[in-house]
Image: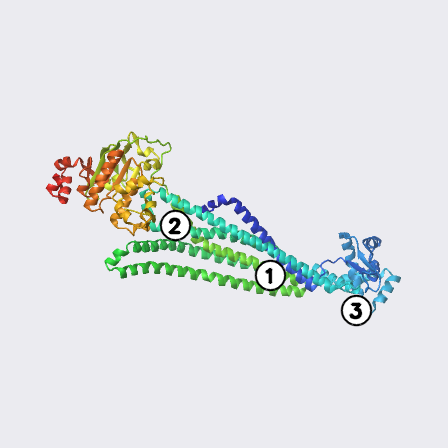
Amino acid sequence: MIKAMRYLKPFWLSVIMIIGLVFLQVQFDLALPDYMSDIVTYGIQYGGISDTLPEALSSDTFQHMKYFMDEDGARLLEDSYEPAESTLYPDAGGEVYVLKNDSEELRAVLEEPFLLVSFLSSDQASSAMNVSPEQVWAMLETNPAAADSFRSALKERTEGFTADNLKAAQILMLRNEYAKIGMDTEKMQNDYILHEGLLMLGIALMASLCAIASSFLASRTATGAARNMRADVFAKVESFASEELSKFSTASLITRTTNDVQQVQQVLTMMLRIVLFAPMMGLTSLFKVLRFKNLAMVLGWTILLMIALMIVTFLFTMPKFRIVQKMVDRLNLVIREQLSGMLVIRAFNNEKNEEERFDRANSDITKLNMFLNRVLAVISPTMTFLMSGVSILIIWIGANAIDLGTMQIGDMLAFLQYATHVLISFMIVAVIFIMIPRSAVSANRIFEVLETETSIHDPENPVHLPEENQTITFDHVSFRYPNAEQNVLSDITFTASPGETVAFIGSTGSGKSTLINLLPRFFDVTEGSIRFGDTDIRSVPQKELRERIGYVPQKGILFSGTVESNLRYADENASEEAIENALEVSQAKEFVDRMPNRLQEEISQGGTNVSGGQKQRLSIARALTKDAQVYIFDDTFSALDYQTDAKLREALNQMIERTQATVFIVAQRISTIMQADRIVVLDEGRVAGIGSHAELMKNCSVYQEIALSQLSEEELAK
């Protein structure tokens, strides 16, 4: 999968934008639990009061606080508060002092005096000390030193309090103070909840927008990367020589270009979106929960269990996914063979056998996929069980902490959300790690194609062919297939001049097609050389060499489209005159003219809607549409009747005489090649004779045997 990441390089700007959007989404999502905690703690529990510094104080509280301050503290209090207009607090029952200057020093000075005054003014203090608040203030007025005893009593009473406990006590007393001076505490609570709630909605909206934008860019980027990957695989396969094509089956190449690229695309999408999101969310949430050590320990053990489960699943499924992809290749191969050979299957009444063959391939892949799906199906409920168990433990431990006063309810709820974020993030990572094995197999299969070295290369310092046609020389040519022990062709030498027709004949397996496929460099010679004039064709770029050649393969192949699109496949800029001439020479004009739409008649895939002879003639017309210097006909007249064959050869000879092209013909029929300027007879990969028909009938026993097996002596003498 690491190699596949290089396909993201052209989309680097999108990747950076995705990372930024995912980071923002994580920050927005992680801000929500804190706001929810504040709403529960300050909005509901503390009535909308979040600051312990009093915004307003009654005259009594303001004056009584001075009993517990030194001169500097009292002066700071006087400087920080000022009397409010009476109309602002009509229900206060006295003068109200409002805050005008806020400072950390003031907060430190006011904390203890405010607690003491609030406590001593409460009914709880009156019951505990059996003295009324008025008596307390009278005592302090006559004996200021008594403040120290009250201060010591408060410290003793709050000795076991945590910072959260003290803050909670301050806020509750401050709420009583606000109610005392006539402030609308219910409105304060509602305003706080509404304000924080609107902020949460805004943050949630921003997180949603970031998620939508990052998902769109991730999908677009992964799709673009997959498109480029498919294009590279296709281009690489196009550059393969026959040696490389034989290494990979057609079914396997189709699977690698479609199914395997699709697997990689899915993981790239998840990596750009989810794999970035999950670690950011998980790690950031993890840092936020570390301040609660008891709860964080529970979470830590759960994460370790999840990691162990991921590793075991990864090691267990990886080999199976490799087998699955090979089975997909096998299934595609069986389907392709059955569809292409359907007529043969029906002709031999082998439908039952083929059904069983397909069923075996289908059942094998189904069983393995079922097994993998069962394994993977265990992951989700296991993760859900762990998350539910952790949630219960967090609530149980948190409830005890709340009971002891060491944690606020809102903090516990926030921790629960952060813990859920952590666990979901690890669960997402677990799912990704389960998907990665299959995608890694697919990526390896793709790069196996991309990294395959082609056996036929263009030269580093290419030589260009002369513009005019030249004599083609096969000079002591030998050829051996890769890893073969013996040569297929051995020491073959002959020449073909412009305007000449050179034919090849021999028994099946004698190497005729192999020899002729050396000229367009579908294979490269093992020994010897093939020269175009004085230029070795191996020193010429393949594209330039093949531009000089019009090639008709042994098996006529047509592409889906129209008659015209198939003819223009050889030269998309061919003139109408060239197309009509090609149809006439190839003897295809007759049946094309009978088609309702003529050149615009649809041709189905593989040319299945035309006969074998028509397909062959259209293949010949396609090659002749190209203004080539060399034409190769690899046993292309076998599907033609004798009359059509004779007409085609006569028209072809006239064209050759006019264009001075060099023609190579591989044939099985003697009648097809009798008029050739030179005939090369092959026998077990060696030259058994070279010459004209008349010369070979005199001095080549192999040619004589082939000729007499096909024609009578009278026909041969014509």
The answer to whether residue 80 is above or below residue 664 is: below
From this viewpoint, is residue 1 visible? no
Which tag is nearer the camera, tag 2 or tag 1? 2
The answer to whether residue 339 is above or below residue 653 is: below
Which tag is nearer the camera, tag 3 or tag 2? 2
Tell me the amino acid under the disc marked 3. Asp
Q: Which residue corresponds to mark 2?
A: 256
Task: State the separation of the CA atoms marked 3 and 2.
Answer: 82 Å
Depth check, front residue: 333 or 467: 467
Tags 2 and 1 in contact by the CB under 8 Å rule? no
* Element type where label 2 sits in the image: helix
On the image, the x and y values in percent for residue 274 come to: 52, 53
Q: Which residue corresponds to mark 3?
A: 123
Q: Which residue corresponds to mark 1?
A: 416
On the image, the x and y values in percent for residue 244 come to: 33, 44
Tell me the amino acid under the disc marked 2. Arg
The tag earlier along the polypeptide, 3 or 2, is 3
* Element type where label 1 sits in the image: helix
- The quadrant where residue 154 appears: bottom right
Quarter of the figure that contains the C terminus: top left
Depth check, front residue: 76 or 206: 206
Q: Residue at x 55, y 47 (%)?
A: 17
Residue pushed farthest right? 142
Depth check, front residue: 189 or 578: 578
- The quadrant where residue 388 appears: bottom right
